[in-house]
Amino acid sequence: MVEAEEGTDVAKAGEDRDDGLLSRYFRYHRVHLAVIAAFLVYPFIYSFLSTAPVVGSTFDLFLPDVETMVFVVVIGLFAMSFDFISGYTGYLSFGHALFYGIGAYFVIMAATGLVPFLSDETPYLLLILYGALFATGAGIVVGLVSFRLTGVYFAMLTLGFAELANIFIRDWSYLGAAPEAGITHGPGFSLGVPYVDGLQVHIGRLVGDSFHSFFGLFGMTEQIAQETVSFYAIGLLVVVCYFALQRIIHSPFGKVMVAIRENEERAKAVGYNTYWYKLGAFSISAFFAGIAGALAAGYRRGASPDNSFDLFVTADALLAAIIGGFGTLAGSLYGHLFHEMLDDFLSTESHGLARYLQGIIPDSVLEAEIVGELTLQVVINGLLAGRAELYLGLVFIFFVLVVPQGLLGTIRERIGGTAAENLPDHLRRYIRGLRK
């Protein structure tokens, strides 16, 4: 048995040597490429299904619109930066919105001429980089102080820094007469290769672009086409950030991060200065959180304390990491996608379940009394309309108690490894079993 296993391992190693570098890359990243492909075709699928005369209104219940998907990838990146430090070192950063907010405010302030050493014509991609570096500097300062503590004390200290920044930014007169309302940049931003006009695309809900005519050939409305341009431009940068984080996690540095999470005292005993490793991980995490904030502000064409520095911004990342699975990185993206889909499904807007039921059920049935003066209309409003946060809280409790490893973490446990490496073979064996 042992000889057979060894022979298999030797054969597999020989197969790897025989394969080219590109072939090995595609084999080990099949799942990544499949997920990227799904995101690439999503705007076309949404446009087709949402405008189909028969199924359009039904599919709109379950499919988030393209604008929502823009924020899925942006907040997904922020959640991944949160998971990078919290899921791989075990140190919960409750004040992670600080770095997200710094990235957001930096690009808007620079674009409106409020950053002295930058021109308001500086390319957006460079502003994103500068904002992320500024967030990294803040991460170093916060980390130097916070990593003197551990556990809940570390978490609360990071939260304290974020709240101080939140209060400061709400009263900072340098931003104008009403700093608590935030700042805006009306013209919008172009994302692409700096100083190369032909490789720039406009992002933002109300900004036009020559690419819209191309997407119009596929039946997309002008609004969906505008959102699709932003989705692809921002999504490309998020993919690059994701693979950069993956590379770091699979490096020797990342192995030490995991060692700190599993047993920090043992990591110290074998000679690692865990303080500096934690500080390095925290700074890297702050860098990518700053990128996420800069992308969100660029798409919104503005930033405010409520959507940048608020505690609930960090709460979104925490919820995404718990639903997707701590220490899985990509799970945070899927966790936030699940969050947005549930929120849309239970929304009070026209695409929500409550409005959908009210539209297909006759008024006579809706107004019919069930018990006393209780009608079906009242039941639908009471159970569904505006109850997204209630059900999301129940889902949060469910994942904590029943699925503590999250969506992707549970899949990893079932298939005995990462989805990128083991899922294709696992699915192949499962299909083979069904055929028998």
Image: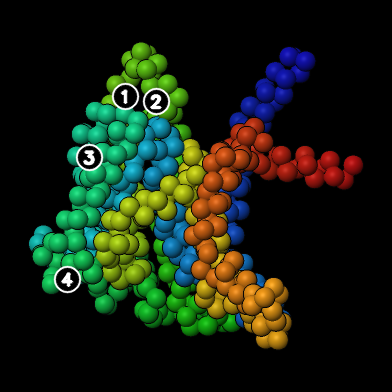
Give the mark, 4 or 1, whose residue is nearer the N terminus.
4
The secondary structure type at the circle numbered 2 is helix
Per the model, the C-alpha gap separating discs 2 and 3 is 19 Å
Q: Nearer the viewer, residue 242 or 414?
A: 414
Query: Mark 2 highlights which residue?
Result: 260
Query: Mark 1 highlights which residue?
Result: 274
Per the model, the C-alpha gap separating discs 4 and 1 is 43 Å
Per the model, the C-alpha gap separating discs 2 and 1 is 7 Å
- Name the front one of labels 4 and 2: 4
- Name the front one of labels 4 and 1: 4
Task: Answer few, some or many: residues within 10 Å of disc 2's Cα (few below 14, many 20 plus, some between 14 and 19).
Answer: many
Kindly identify the residue that appears in the image at 37 percent across and 79 percent down.
206
What's under tag 1, amino acid-wise? Thr
Query: Mark 4 highlights which residue?
Result: 178
Which of the 4 image quarters holds residue 71? bottom left
Per the model, the C-alpha gap separating discs 4 and 3 is 28 Å
The secondary structure type at the circle numbered 3 is helix
Give the mark, 4 or 2, whose residue is nearer the N terminus.
4
The answer to whether residue 236 of the structure is visible from this angle is no
Q: Nearer the viewer, residue 413 or 277?
A: 413
What's under tag 4, amino acid-wise? Ala
Give the mark, 2 or 1, whose residue is nearer the N terminus.
2
Which of the 4 image quarters holds residue 8? top right
Q: Check if mark 2's residue and mark 1's residue have beta carbons within 8 Å.
A: yes
What's under tag 2, amino acid-wise? Ile
Query: Mark 3 highlights which residue?
Result: 142
What's under tag 3, amino acid-wise? Val
